[in-house]
Image (cartoon, rainbow, N blue to C red):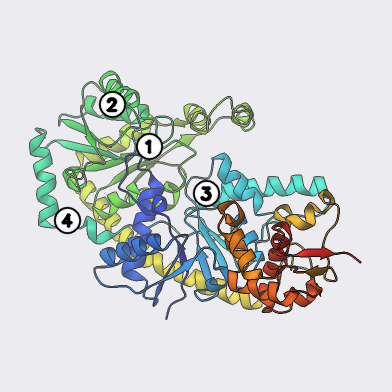
Amino acid sequence: MPSTAAIYYHPDAFSIARSDLKGRHSAGAGFLAALSRHHNAMPLHCYASERRLAVEFAQTVERMAGRPRPVSWIATSNLAKLAEPGCLFLPGPTLGEYAWQRRFSDQRAYSLCGVTHTICTPGVMDALGDYMVAPLQPWDALIVTSHPARTAISAVLESWGDYLQTRFGGQAHSPVQMPVIPLGVDCDRFTGTPENCTLGAELRRRHGIGPDDVVVLFYGRLSFHAKAHPLPMFQACEQTQARMHRKLHLVLTGSASNAEIEREFQEGARRYCPSVNTIILDGTDPAHGLAPWFGADVFMSLSDNIQETFGLTPIEAMAAGLPVIVSDWDGYQDTISDGEVGFRIPTLLPLPGSGQELAYRALMKVDSSDRYMGAASQATAVDAAAAGDALLRLAEDPELRRRMGEAGRKRARALFDWSVVIAAYEALWGELAQLRASAEEIAPLRPAAEPFPLRADPFLVFHGFATRQMGLDTRLFCGHADPEKALTDILVAGMNTFSAGTLLPPESVQLLLRHAQGQERSLEELTGLLAPDLRRRAARTVGWLVKCGLLEVRFG
């Protein structure tokens, strides 16, 4: 049986049925579908806050797998049960808070495994900084989807570690494993079946694209500030059209977050590539389906944005047999072998240190995260002339397109098919299990120490607020002739029971009252009536009983 993990499930991380579709949603949906089909652990474990979410998870994986898949629900309140799968998979990089939660249980009971998507937002940067402070362990991992993203994260951690060393005098480092495992695609979905080829042919016919015309496809969010600025792409297409006799068409398949951004793309295409027939298709419309992939001749994505860490669409293009032209940027450097499956176009960043004002403006909330990313993108150059040269080569050489497309198809299946990627996840989860058994524990919990000092026992932190505080020798007395009736009178009011879930159940409360009826008992005696795992709850319940007048405190 392969090594496995409980999947932290919330629809936001795994659903593509949304108007604000982003790469992380597509990646999450693809991962869950792949897990359903390729991960043969029995059962699949769903870590969710509510049973209805576990039911939704079970229905989703059965639909995606095309067969029944047994599912075990692990409630988020039941940390101990995570020892069964031995790992908790989180669909993001925020590991610190879950490490603190684990510390209330057993730090060796299970591993934490996250994955990167965007890494430049304040929330993610803070989460990475937490790796130095939170009780993370060598058996925890952050899956990084590309080597450039890993380099960026390492730079952040190194700089943060230097600060902590300056501040506290000791060396600081992150114990978290950071393996590079790419995102995946379902290569079978992009096979050139007769049905898919027909969809592509119909798209070309519908838009008046001739058999000898060349179609360039961009697929992704239409966002000049948070995805890819389109100017180099427009310029490359216009330059190419000016040097060739065939008609060039540019198909932009995606959606903009608002009408103003969509209008910028439309007007930009008219202004900067007026000789090219530009077609904009709504990427969220299922009616388009796979047609753009099989109606195109070349795929182009000149990403220049720091929010990108991997980039799924070039992998999908390779799976569909398209040659690709991409910027030499982020994860594209890993996925696109230059000159084999397409071309990587040079990019240029400004002088180091010249972006400090951008970071300051974001810190001071002068600029939003989107504007911060957009400002960095605005000063990042992509060589439009080189992109035009690459496009001209492919546009004029059908055999080169065919050869590179076939090489891309093979590369996608060998390295990025979800069956390959899920196997890499399984191998990682197995390695983390070995580390749990052998690696030295970092910051083991000392006896009587608070698991999370910033979320400590309120009766410890605020002990100075009260006149007195109970001890195990505190004497307690129940003077009611009918304790059960007195308890019933208290339980009828919601103001007395709004936190009942943190107290003992009524039958256990009655046991305490009967035992103290007419006779002084120590707190130690009363809590000793119950199982050890209930004694802290019993101590809180005694405080509630005193509050409600059902017990009296007798100080010596």
Q: Residue at x 61, y 68 (%)?
A: 139
Quadrant containing the N terminus in the rendered view: bottom left
Q: Residue at x 60, y 60 (%)?
A: 489
| Disc 1 from disc 4: Cα separation | 25 Å
Hey, which residue is sitting farthest front in the picture? 481
Q: Secondary structure at mark 3?
A: helix
Image-quadrant location for residue 207: top left
Identify the residue under disc 4.
192
Q: Amino acid at mark 4?
A: Gly
Identify the residue under disc 3.
149
Task: Give yes or no for contact between labels 2 and 1 (Cβ–Cβ under 8 Å).
Answer: no
Identify the residue under disc 2.
239
Asked if residue 541 lies left or right of residue 43, the reply is right
Quadrant containing the C terminus in the rendered view: bottom right
Q: Residues within 10 Å of mark 4 (few under 14, many from 20)?
A: some
Q: Secondary structure at mark 2?
A: helix
Task: Give yes or no for contact between labels 3 and 1 (Cβ–Cβ under 8 Å).
Answer: no
Identify the residue under disc 1.
302
Q: Residue at x 82, y 49 (%)?
A: 465
Q: Residue at x 51, y 76 (%)?
A: 84
Disc number for residue 269: none
Asked if residue 251 lies left or right of residue 162, the reply is left
| Disc 2 from disc 1: Cα separation | 15 Å
